[in-house]
Image (cartoon, rainbow, N blue to C red):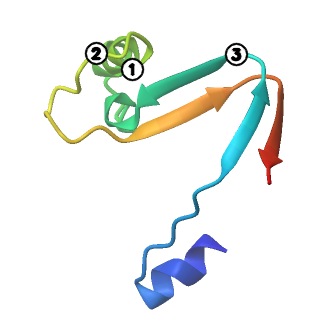
Amino acid sequence: MGGAFYRVEQARYAIVRLKIAGRVFVGDTNNCFDATVNEAENLLLAGWYWENEPNPAKEPVIREMLADGDIEREI
């Protein structure tokens, strides 16, 4: 499905209200490791991610949410 959006070069977004029964963590994806083989750099970025530190490149925050438990879409 995502491939179709790339073909038409148009961003698609959906805003939904979710009901989450469980824990939630929100982190800045700019702090995720960048698929390098540099273990020290990956561990440093992972620490920044899990501690919600500002990303080193000072890029605008891109939030991702991780949830454990049941997730339902509220209508």
Residue lying at the far front in this picture: please name it. 75
**Residue at horizontal 30%, vertical 13%?**
44
Label count reads 3
> In this picture, is 60 found above or below 21?
below
Residue 1 left/right relative to 21: left
Q: Are marks 2 and 1 in contact (CB under 8 Å)?
A: yes
**Residue at horizontal 48%, vertical 87%?**
7
Q: Nearer the viewer, residue 22 or 4?
A: 22
> In this picture, is 50 found above or below 7?
above
Q: Which mark is residue 53?
A: 2
**Which secondary structure, mark 3?**
loop
Q: Quadrant of residue 34?
A: top left
**Which secondary structure, mark 1?**
helix
Q: Which residue is mark 1?
A: 49
Q: CA distance from mark 2 to mark 1?
A: 6 Å
Q: Quadrant of residue 28?
A: top left
- Indicate the amino acid at tag 1: Tyr
Q: Nearer the viewer, residue 73 or 65?
A: 73
Q: Which mark is residue 23?
A: 3
- Indicate the amino acid at tag 3: Arg
Q: Earlier in the sequence, mark 2 or mark 3?
A: 3
